[in-house]
Amino acid sequence: MDNLLINILFVLLPILIFQIFYINIDSKYKNIILATVFSISTVIIMNFPIENYEGHLFDLRYIAFVLGALYGGKKVAIFLYFVVLTYRFYIGGAGFYIALIDSTLLLIILLFFLIPKYQKYSLKTKINVTMALLGVVAIISLIICHTFFGFILHAPIVLLSSFVVAQALTMGLSVYTLEYFISIDTMKKQLYHNEKLKSLSEMAASISHEVRNPLTVTRGFIQLLKSPDIDDNKKDAYLDLSLQELDRAESIISDYLTFAKPHVNVELELLNIAEEMNYIANVMQPYALMQNVSITKECFIKESYILGNQKQFHQCLINLSKNAIEAMHNGGKLEFKVSKENGIIIIQLVDSGIGMSSEQIARLGVPFFTNKEKGTGLGTMVAYSIVKAMKGEIKVKSKMNEGTVFTIFLPESESRLSTDKSYL
Ligand code: ADP
Ligand code: MG
């Protein structure tokens, strides 16, 4: 009984291990991992047979074999076939010849009948077919034992039938578990995809709304300009306002495009992080002065590079700095801190502004989340998608009425641009 449980454990364990990797790896390695974990488990299973009856081992090795074959494909099937036979041969005993017949039979059924069609079956069919297969193989092997070794005559019938039942049931349970994990993974991917589509379409709707306002305003001014008795001062003012409104429309559209396709068709270059931070600090200076904010800089690195698009990187930092400055209604201090740790560049934006509650932090990066009267709620979202495209990460810490720290982590790049274009 103990060994039955060990057998079941080592059928289920590879499924658990496999599902951890299933989500994060590409298919090339998937099969190698599958073949490895299932061959280890067949070997362990054979070491703990449920019964060793006159050199005939009763164990659940074929479940691991069938699972590996059905989910890994033909190559994994052939590999596992040899693992099972080699190890069974090494253990020795009359049972080897039975194993040879059983596993060859299984391999033929798997290669020519089951593997080509299996993935198209419904869950119910998958469970039924595999349970039937393992049940039938167990019975066939007992019949062979009986015919060639006469051994069934001595073995208790309870042992034989409970082995057949245990094998079929465990098979069904394993397929169910594995399919369950796979379905969760598929669901997650779909959810993510839908979420992205949803926000894209929500954005498209609001973009057209947002762009219409400046266009209507501009149209009004142009109409006013047409009237003959308008003085030059007014003319200038109308033109300025029209230009401002058009700029606003333009920036909304470019924000949207950066979010929708942050890393398509952009030129990547090596960016000297110290120089870029200098640039940002200078660019933000006038805006900061207007709000009574002083900017300071602490840069502990000189010759460090990151790979990215300069315009987008600027946009990301400008969006975040703008928010920081806007959070300091009565003036304050904005600090840029740049350092490096284990090949990761760390950029911090520390402000002494109004801060955010944890609910606000949780909603950062979501389109249209804004607490400002004239806000668009696009700034942080764009910053997040740019950093993500650069294979980086943003973390936020904040305290109400004390201030906020945005920390950006970016992988440092060697000065070999040509070798790393993996995210082009
Ligand atoms: P917008 O600036 O147009 O409102 P953002 O996406 O840039 O849109 O910012 C969303 C919201 O996040 C802001 O309205 C603000 O409430 C909050 N926020 C972002 N950065 C900060 C910060 N440094 N301090 C306080 N609040 C912030
Ligand atoms: Mg903003």
Image (cartoon, grey):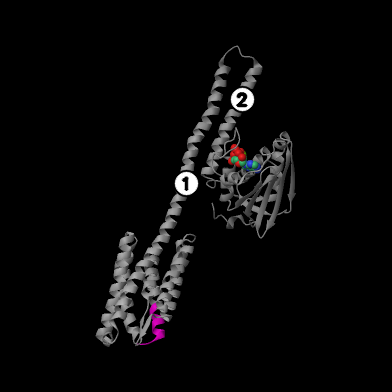
Find residue 175 and report its horizontal and vertical position in percent: 37, 65
- Which residue: 45% across, 70% down? 13
Determine which of the numbered discs, if any, sits on residue 195 in the image: 1
Q: Distance between the residues labelled 2 and 1?
A: 37 Å
Q: Name the residue under label 2.
A: 241
Q: Where is 414 relative to 330, above or below?
A: below
In screen coordinates, is 190 left or right of 222?
A: left
Neighbour class for label 2 at 10 Å: few (<14), some, many (≥20)? some
Q: Is mark 1 on a helix, strand or loop?
A: helix
Amino acid type, callout 1: Glu
Query: In which image quadrant can residue 259 be found?
Result: top right
Q: Where is 12 relative to 191, above or below?
A: below
Q: Does the magenta stretch include residue 389?
A: no
Q: Give the range drawn in magenta.
A: 84-93
Find residue 338 and report its horizontal and vertical position in percent: 70, 51
Quarter the N terminus occupies:
bottom left
Q: Earlier in the sequence, mark 2 or mark 1?
A: 1
Query: In which image quadrant can residue 111 be found?
Result: bottom left
Mark 2, mark 1: which one is toward the viewer? Answer: 1
- Which residue: 73% across, 40% down? 332
In screen coordinates, is 259 left or right of 326?
A: left
- Which residue: 50% across, 38% down? 203
Q: Residue furthest top?
A: 229
Find residue 395 and report its horizontal and vertical position in percent: 62, 51
Number of marks in the rendered image = 2
Tell which of 292 and 316 is nearer to you: 292
Amino acid type, callout 2: Leu
Find residue 328 and report its horizontal and vertical position in percent: 69, 38
